[in-house]
Structure formats: structure tokens, C-alpha cells
Amino acid sequence: MNHNMKILIVDDFSTMRRIIKNLLRDLGFNNTHEADDGNTAWPMLRSGNFDFLVTDWNMPGMQGIDLLRAVRADPQLCNLPVLLVTAEARRDQIVLAAEAGVNGYIVKPFTAQTLKEKLDKIFERLAATA
Amino acid sequence: MEQAERLALARQLVDALERGALDTAEHCLHALSEQRGSHLLRQVAEVTRDVHQAFGGVVSDQRLYEISKHAMPDARERLSYVIEKSEDSAHRTLTAVETMLPIAERLSTAEAADVRAAGVSLKAGLTDVLMAQEYQDLTGQVIKKTIDIVEQVELKLVSLIIAERLATGHAVTGTKPARGEATGPAIKPAADVMNHQHDVDDLLAELGV
């Protein structure tokens, strides 16, 4: 796993962005950037050479699920790994996210350990299919 | 009058049946059932009028006007205040944690074993404090949702009051969340809500993610 990878954290709550940023730093990822909703994140993703996207679902403006769909529909970004970290926990939502091509799904409240496990799993899978 | 009419029709019906005059019997039956139908309609109309009057009385109540005009906007402001204050507090905690984490990190790689151990547990404790600030996101989402609901009720109430003042009816329609619509954190367990990360993992595994 490349610890220099460029990660975008998208959440409308600045406290949550800070928490995820700190957790990622603790796991050795220091190259993190932040956006407060899909609309802010989209131009950053288009021009920023990001390697990984961590996004919330429920945000004003562009929601996380729509950001995920936009990423998958974009020829340049379609292979970007996406992890949803959200309080949305209904079955139909998780199915929808899976259908949209999410790589991992963490339900809030979560633990540092859960984040580590999901990241490991996502990169293991990506390495296996590469 | 009504009663007498019905009795007369019933007698005619019996008479017609006895005579075997099926056409007349049919006619009487039809008239009887029609009368019954119009009676039902009249009852429905009465109930509707009663409901409308009772409802109009509630809507034109001055207290309800006060609630929609002052109490509800005030409630929304109070809820926004809770979000603001808890956000400030969470950020202060996060700043303190971020200042202390590198110190704990340094201690956890110190030469003396006891200092190292202290550093490790300090780091674990600080990570716990960090994660605990997650409440601000979760409660914040719930409060935002509640503010939305209060605002919607407020708007409905205002339009009801206006409608009542214009002496016209106002239908209140409800909507169900569309598939996949974001509804915020689950506050109580429900059949279609994943309460644990492992439930989510199981579902994702089923879906091949």
C-alpha cells in the first residue's frame, strides 16, 4: 500500500473530516485533502490526481452517492477507489451504493480499527485485480 | 317523510314479488337502494362539514398562529445553537488531541520501557477521545433533520391558516422517502436498517463488494 497516495476526504461536518484525517495520519497517510460536499469535491477530483476517495453520503449540494456515480461515469476517474463513511444504514442504500460501484462502506459511528480493516481490504482487492 | 317513502316502496316491492311482476320489483329495489345511497352521501357530507368546522376552529385558534409565527422559528434557532456549540466544543477537543498526539507518539518510541508503555496507552486514549467527537456529526445530522421537520410543519401550518382565512380547503399530502434517499442516522432499530458494521459487511459480501 502506497502511503504517499493522495486522499480526498468529503464530509459536510468539519469535525468528521478532522477525525478521518487524524485516523488516516495515524495509519501513515499524510497526503490528505478535504472538501465539504460533492460539488466542491468534483473539480478537485477532476484536476487533482487523487488516488483514493473517502466520502460521506448525506451532504447539502451534491450527495456522496451522486459523487460516486459521477466518478464511475467519468473515463478518467472511473477506477478511483471509493469508500463511503456514512450514517445512512438502510439496506436499500447499501445495495444502491454497491450497484453504483462502491469499494467499501462504513457505517457511522465507526472505530479506528474498522477504518483500518476496510482500507486494508480495499487495497488487497485492488492489488489482486491489478 | 323519508321513512314513509321507504315503507311505501317496500310494500310495493312485496306486492310486486307476490304478483310475480318482476319489472316492478326491480324498479322498487332500485329506488330503495338509490335512496339508501343518497342517505349515505348525506351522512358523509355531514361528517365532512363537522370535520371542517372542527378543523377550522383549531386553525383559526390564535395560539396556533402564535406557535407557527414565533415558537417554531424559535425552536429552530435553539436547535441551530446546539449544533453550533457542540461543533465548537468538538473542534476544541480535536485541537487539544492533535497537539497531544505527537507527544504521545514520541513517548511511545522512547528508550525507557515504562515511558514507552505510557506513550502507547496515552496514544490509545487520545484516539478514543478523537473518535468520541464523532457524536457531533451524528447528533448534528439528527438536529438538522429535526430543524427541517419543524420548518416543514411550520410552513404547512402557515398555509393552513392562510387557507382557512380564505375559507378554502387545504389538503395536506404526505410523501414517502424515495429509494436511496438520505434520511440521516438511524435513531431506533428498524427491520431495514443495518445496526452493526458486520451486518453491512454481510450485505456487501452478498452483493460481491
Image (cartoon, rainbow, N blue to C red):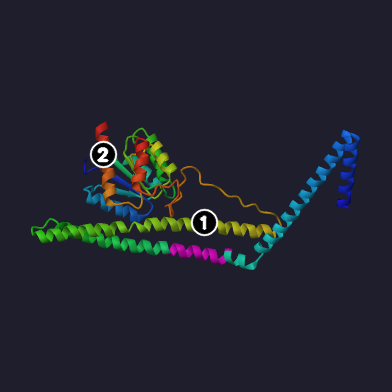
User: What amino acid type is highlighted by mark number 1?
Assistant: Ile
> Magenta segment range?
B68-81
Crowding at dot 1, Cα within 10 Å, few <14 / some 14-19 / many 20+, comes out as few
- On the question of residue A50 being in view, the answer is no
Snapshot quadrant of residue A91: top left
Position in image of residue B189 (x %, y %): 43, 52
Give the total of numbered labels: 2
- In this view, the residue in front, B113 or B104, is B113
Mark 2 neighbour density, 10 Å: few (under 14) some (14–19) many (20 or more): some
- Type of residue at label 2? Phe
Query: Is B73 included in the stretch rendered in magenta?
Result: yes
Q: Quadrant of residue B50?
A: bottom right
The residue that label 2 is drawn on is A123
Depth check: give the residue in front, B104 or B1.
B1
Give the chain letter at badge 2: A
- Note whether residue B125 is visible: yes
Residue A40 position, x and y percent, is: 38, 47
Q: Mark 1 points at which residue?
A: B149
- Which residue extends farthest front? B18
Q: What element carries label 2?
A: helix
Residue B203 in magenta? no
Instruction: Report the magenta stretch's main SS.
Output: helix
How many angstroms separate mark 1 from mark 2 (CA)?
Answer: 41 Å
Quadrant that contains the C terminus of chain B = top left
Which of the labelled discs sits on residue A121, or is there none?
none
Same chain assignment for discs 1 and 2:
no
- Taking B145 as reference, is B12 left or right? right
Q: Where is residue A7 in the image (x, y as percent from the top left)?
A: 28, 45
**Left or right: residue B91 compared with residue B105:** right
